[in-house]
Amino acid sequence: MRSSRSLDGLWVTADDPHAVDHAGLVLVATLAERLGLAQLVDEHVVLKEHGAHASDKVLTIVHALVAGADCIDDLDLLRAGATEAVLGHSVVAPSTAGTFLRAISLGHVRQLDAVLGETFGRLRALGGASPDVVVDVDSTLCETYGLMKEGARKVMRTGRRGYHPIIAATEDGDVVHVRLRRGRTNDGSGAARFVGETLARLKRTGADTVVLRADSGFYQRDVVDACRRRGVGFSIGARIHRGMAQAISSVPDQAWVPIDYPYGEGAAVAEVPWVAFSKDPHGERTGGIPVRLLIRRVPPSPGIQAPLFPTYSYHPFVTDRPGDIVELDRFHRAHAKVEAVIKDLKHHGGLAHLPSGRFGANSAWLVLCALAYNLVRAVGRLGMGETTRSLKTLRRRVLSVPGRLTRSGRHRRLHLPAQWPWATQFLAAWDRLRNLVLVT
């Protein structure tokens, strides 16, 4: 007996010019309009060739990244039905966007970076952000394959090819600054300049008390000096060398303070007097920087055979912040929050595939990924009151919803599915974003 739910009686046609794919992009587009993003792009981004209508090209890429694009051809997903009508700008063809990206030099990347910085500041102003900011800096590997991509042709020490971008994000998860680097680049290469630019950007947006967190790849005198010049606190992982190893070995057992650690019992932290960077790279003595050196010792991970004589792994970091060493250690371990931002960018934000063979184009793509990421997070925070949802979750629940556009008199109406679980939340978010007022 044939089921009444059989698909045999279903007919499929592609004949509705009013259908809207990814209708939820109207939330992101509304926020971008309130931020004046198109005007910012036209003001900052100036290309002699292929630079006409730069705002349309940039916003096409940004909205496609929000919708899930991870290569230039994916920009075509915005040209389905009446989707352009909910974006507030002309949608360019993938070939046009690709030509635009390939015309971008590193100087033009700095122009796009200025747009990212200004947008970040405006989002902080709209959200009533706290003047106290914790910023995490970290690097990651964006793996590539083949030999056609500039800056990613050489094999790194990991045995892979790729790019080595550096990313700065607030503790709340907003991207402050990004910079693409060639694959065979040291973790801390260009770190001091990048940190200086990041801190200056935060100061311009009204941040008063700033603390920088980073891992041992950024354990450099220039990085610490950049923080000290701007009155910024720091908590930076340290590399263990011979002198530090001797200092750690001399810590008496009673000086180790137990801490709560998620991976087994027996972890502890201690502090020893320390003067960092007392020698230059050539081994010559210099005026060092007095800091607090805290060491966390961790027992073997659970699940492996316990050794007869327990051994520990040691994780030192330097800081200039006052306070209890247990709390300072907990604060430093929270640096791992930046990994969630990197994961979101790489798996759901367009960084899984840097799409061009040109280094300048890929650098611009990275900046636009950060811009799209911040817009989506701001939609969740300002529109829906959510701060913990991942980009993937927001896209699946809200941004990818289909719709239908109708016109009545001088008004257009976007119809969303009935009995949609997130309809009430969506409509409330749209109302909040429409009523945002940016004070400049």
Image: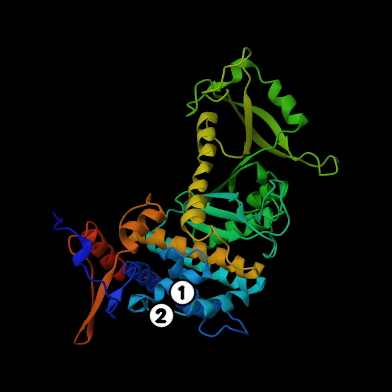
Q: Residue at x 67, y 64 (%)?
A: 149
Q: CA distance from mark 1 to mark 2?
A: 8 Å
What amino acid does circle 2 point to? His
Q: Residues within 10 Å of mark 2 (few under 14, many from 20)?
A: some
Q: Residue 136 in the image: x percent, y percent? A: 55, 48
Q: Is residue 166 left or right of residue 89?
A: right
Nearer to me, 141 or 12: 12
Nearer to me, 123 or 216: 216
Quadrant where the image shows the N terminus: bottom left
Residue that sits furthest to the top in the current view: 308
Disc 2 target residue: 89
What amino acid does circle 1 point to? Leu
Disc 1 target residue: 59
Mark found first going from the N terminus, 1 or 2: 1
Residue that sits furthest to the bottom in the current view: 409
Q: Is residue 122 left or right of residue 148?
A: left
Is label 1 in a helix, a strand or a loop? helix
Q: Residue 109 in the image: x percent, y percent? A: 61, 70
Q: Is residue 196 left or right of residue 340?
A: right
Q: Residue 415 in the image: x percent, y percent? A: 22, 72
Q: Residue at x 85, y 43 (%)?
A: 282
Display colour scheme: rainbow
**Residue 29, disc:** none
**Residue 169 in the image: above or below residue 77:** above
Q: Residue 303 in the image: x percent, y percent? A: 51, 23
Label total for image? 2
Question: Is residue 89 in view from this perspective?
Answer: yes
Is label 2 in a helix, a strand or a loop? loop
Q: Residues within 10 Å of mark 1 (few under 14, many from 20)?
A: many
Q: Decide: marks 1, 2 in contact (CB < 8 A)? A: yes
Q: Residue at x 33, y 79 (%)?
A: 85
